[in-house]
Amino acid sequence: MDLTTCYMGLGLRHPVVASASPLSANLDGIKRLEDGGASAIVMFSLFEEQLQQEMASVDHLTAVGAESFGESLSYFPSVDEFHVGPDRYLDLVRRGAEAVDIPVIASLNCVTAEGWGDYAALLAETGASALELNVYFLPGDPEMSGAAVEEQYLEALSAAKAACSLPVALKLSPYFSAMAHLARRFEAAGADGLVLFNRFYQPDFDLEELAVAPDLQLSSAGEIRLPLRWIAMLYGRIGVSLAATTGVEGPREVIKYLLAGADAVMTTSALLRNGPAYCQTLVEGLGEWMDRRGFDSVAQMQGVLSQQKVADPTAFARANYLRILESWKNPYTL
């Protein structure tokens, strides 16, 4: 059975990739992820704010941080709260790439195209196999249009592509008005892959302290539907690699994402819950299902349930919306 796949030109021995998380925060963690069965590792993110620390004022940093948030643990980070600086991150990526035999993908969590383009070039010299741009931006300015938000993403991508020769993936949020059209624009701008979708960690309110409180919830299988739908709709319509992320609890989610058309399936929450060795559980579950269903390779099953290939493509469109509503049986009616 052939479990291999190709993601942004990188040959992977299977589709299960360890996505950005604290598990890759040191060399021992990187080795554990490889030993646990990951086919590639996306490093935890280096934040644009960390790169600006040496050149920007604290006021500027606070203003940017108020509208961006990724794998950090605070919604309003101060400069003293960053534990891994740019130089240490470069060194860790370099040592990680040398220590393992699987691709190591560097990750930049960025808001703008300024201040870190040169750093992408330095990452290319570490031995990293690719670069993931986590453009984590929540536009709260009522004067900022949707078109301006899209341009910010495109500028970040263009800056990265101009600065380095590595394959570049964009990790996107789902909040765009015309996702398919924008995906085409990213392809035209040189994106090698799209990672669908980023999760905005939402704040909560502490009713006793009357304060905004960070509340990090690991993803669950119920969150798979949105990225599953868009991967299925984009498969075969754009020429970039598609990676799925969010909601991978077990082999079932890996299988569904591949049937939709994903080239790689990334997981963080399942590994934080179960440990790095859970990667192998996901891979084994995939192989067992493929054997039972008669699939000889991952390539053979990819996109089988995409919009391009299903018998009823309207299942992905609005026409199916009415059918779903009509199929619901109200248990409280006589």
Image (cartoon, rainbow, N blue to C red):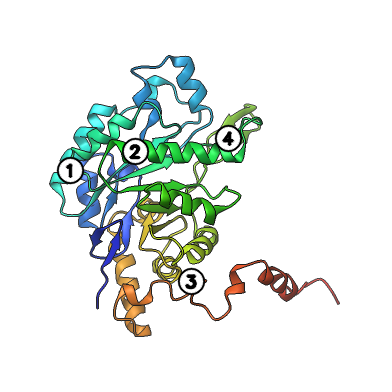
Q: Secondary structure at mark 4?
A: loop
Judge whether 322 appears above or below 201 on screen: below
Task: Name the amino acid type tagged 4.
Answer: Pro
**Residue farthest to the left, as pictured:** 98
Position of the C terminus by quadrant: bottom right
For label 2, the residue is 160
Q: Nearer the viewer, residue 170 or 95?
A: 170
**Closer to the camera in the image, 75 or 308:** 308
Foreground mark, 2 or 4?
Answer: 2
Give the structural element (helix, strand or loop) at label 3.
Answer: loop
Callouts 4 and 3 close, C-beta under 8 Å: no
Residue designated by label 4: 139
Secondary structure at badge 2 equals: helix
Give the percent coordinates (x, y) of residue 217.
50, 46
Badge 2 local density, few (<14 within 10 Å), some, or many (20+)? many
Q: Which residue is mark 3?
A: 306
Give the residue furthest to the right: 334
- Residue situated in front as seen by the camera: 154 or 119: 154
Q: How many marks?
A: 4
Query: Which tag, 2 or 4, sits closer to the chain's start?
Result: 4
Vertical position of residue 287 compared to residue 181: above or below: below
Separation of disc 4 and disc 1 at Cα? 34 Å
